[in-house]
Image (cartoon, rainbow, N blue to C red):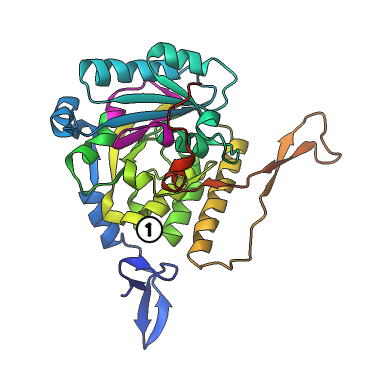
């Protein structure tokens, strides 16, 4: 069995072939790739492996920043910030910076985060003078621009029952192993429904969109349990070299781009236990999926695997039952959403245009 590759990077779509009388035939064996199995064994740890005091001894002069992108998260952001400050700033001085990026919130997110002890910066202030972009990815980019740590960890601001091991688990491999450049979290995501609680019912977009796409075109990434997880950490000098997609494709693009930049062995994942957060409705998940598909398309295009002139449509048509504008015979409204993606270039390319001093929200 052979793979069409050179120098550890794929030149063609990474389908596996066997030679049958000199003719390539698609392989149909249902086995785990030895590369994925070895990586998942070697580069997977548990948050319990990384107690805070052990990491403090390993930290040395390394500065650690934690960044929370937040849009209208006044109900949860305060508890997350307070937990990090109490356990990882005051009790064990592991985190040097705790930053909340206010992503155009219309509620009291900024005030609550500041009162809990975070430094709050404005997404718009950090990107002033650059094209205006929307979405989580741009808030993450602004947070990276604001942070000064050598290691930067990102944590979503909608988590409930947050525990400090979410941070220590992410930064542990980075503080103890110089060959690791990026760490992705994974966890159980319970989904509460009318029929009860489904222990792993969350992550629907992962199973229906992201995992199939990554397995088809970037099978080296198949070992990531939750490629769309919002909790991850990396070395600043590496994160500054990759672009940030503005919308919900940011995690997909980041994994693909980092695979290209540093290789699979520099990536790792950590089991963070259980993650509880707000779940979105099916229509919103459809829009997220569309952005992930467009993001994957953009990376396939850069690799030359799709025609450079072929661009998918960026309008998603969905149907909503009832409503004041329901069409005859349909009994539904037609809802059209723009799911196009944009991206910030790598921060290293724009550092000279970013404010030297952080601007508070």
Toward the right, the furthest residue is 328
**Can residue 133 be seen?**
yes
In the rendered structure, does residue 129 fall within the stretch colored magenta? no
Residue numbers of the magenta segment? 145-167
For disc 1, the neighbor class at 10 Å (few under 14, some 14 to 19, many from 20) is: some
**Can residue 202 be seen?**
no
Which residue does the numbered mark 1 point to in the structure image? Answer: 260
Element on which disc 1 rests: helix
Q: Quadrant of the N terminus?
A: bottom left
Whether residue 8 is situated above or below residue 21 in the rendered picture: above
In the rendered structure, does residue 166 fall within the stretch colored magenta? yes
Residue at image location 49% in from the left, 40% down from the top: 353
- Image quarter of residue 99: top left
Counting the numbered discs, the total is 1
Left of 231 or right of it: where is 102? right
Residue at image location 46% in from the left, 36% down from the top: 140
Residue 60 position, x and y percent, is: 16, 32
Whether residue 101 is situated above or below residue 136 in the rendered picture: above
- In-front residue for pair 223/135: 135
- In-front residue for pair 340/243: 243
Residue 48 position, x and y percent, is: 20, 31
Residue 13 position, x and y percent, is: 45, 68
Residue at image location 77% in from the left, 37% down from the top: 332
Residue 292 position, x and y percent, is: 53, 48
Left of 53 or right of it: where is 202? right
Toward the bottom, the furthest residue is 21
């Amino acid at each position: 069995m052979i793979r069409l590759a050179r120098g550890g990077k794929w030149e063609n779509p990474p389908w596996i072939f066997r030679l049958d009388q000199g003719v390539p035939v698609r392989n149909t064996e249902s086995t785990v790739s030895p590369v994925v199995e070895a990586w998942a064994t070697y580069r997977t740890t548990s948050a319990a492996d990384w107690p805070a005091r052990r990491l403090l001894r390993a930290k040395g002069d390394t500065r650690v920043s934690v960044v929370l992108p937040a849009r209208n998260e006044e109900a949860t952001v305060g508890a997350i910030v307070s937990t990090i400050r109490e356990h990882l700033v005051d009790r064990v001085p592991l985190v040097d910076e705790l930053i909340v990026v206010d992503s155009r919130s219309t509620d009291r997110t900024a005030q609550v985060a500041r009162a809990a002890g975070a430094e709050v910066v404005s997404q718009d202030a950090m990107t002033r003078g650059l094209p205006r972009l929307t979405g989580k990815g741009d808030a993450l980019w602004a947070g990276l621009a604001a942070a000064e740590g050598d290691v930067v960890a990102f944590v979503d601001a909608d988590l409930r029952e947050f525990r400090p091991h979410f941070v220590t688990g992410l930064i542990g491999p980075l503080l103890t192993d110089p060959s690791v450049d990026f760490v992705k979290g994974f966890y159980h995501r319970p989904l509460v429904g009318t029929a009860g609680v489904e222990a792993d019912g969350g992550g629907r977009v992962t199973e229906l969109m992201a995992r199939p796409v990554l397995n088809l075109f970037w099978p080296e990434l198949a070992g990531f349990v939750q490629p769309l997880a919002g909790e991850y950490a990396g070395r600043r000098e590496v994160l500054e070299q990759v672009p940030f997609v503005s919308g919900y494709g940011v995690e997909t693009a980041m994994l693909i781009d980092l695979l290209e930049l540093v290789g699979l062995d520099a990536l790792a994942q950590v089991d963070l236990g259980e993650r509880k957060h707000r779940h979105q409705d099916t229509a919103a998940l459809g829009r997220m999926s569309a952005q992930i598909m467009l993001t994957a398309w953009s990376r396939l295009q850069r690799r030359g695997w799709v025609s450079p002139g072929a661009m998918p449509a960026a309008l998603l048509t969905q149907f909503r039952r009832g409503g004041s504008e329901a069409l005859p015979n349909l009994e539904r409204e037609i809802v059209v959403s723009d799911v196009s993606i944009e991206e910030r270039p790598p921060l290293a390319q724009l550092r000279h245009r970013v404010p030297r001093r952080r601007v508070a929200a």
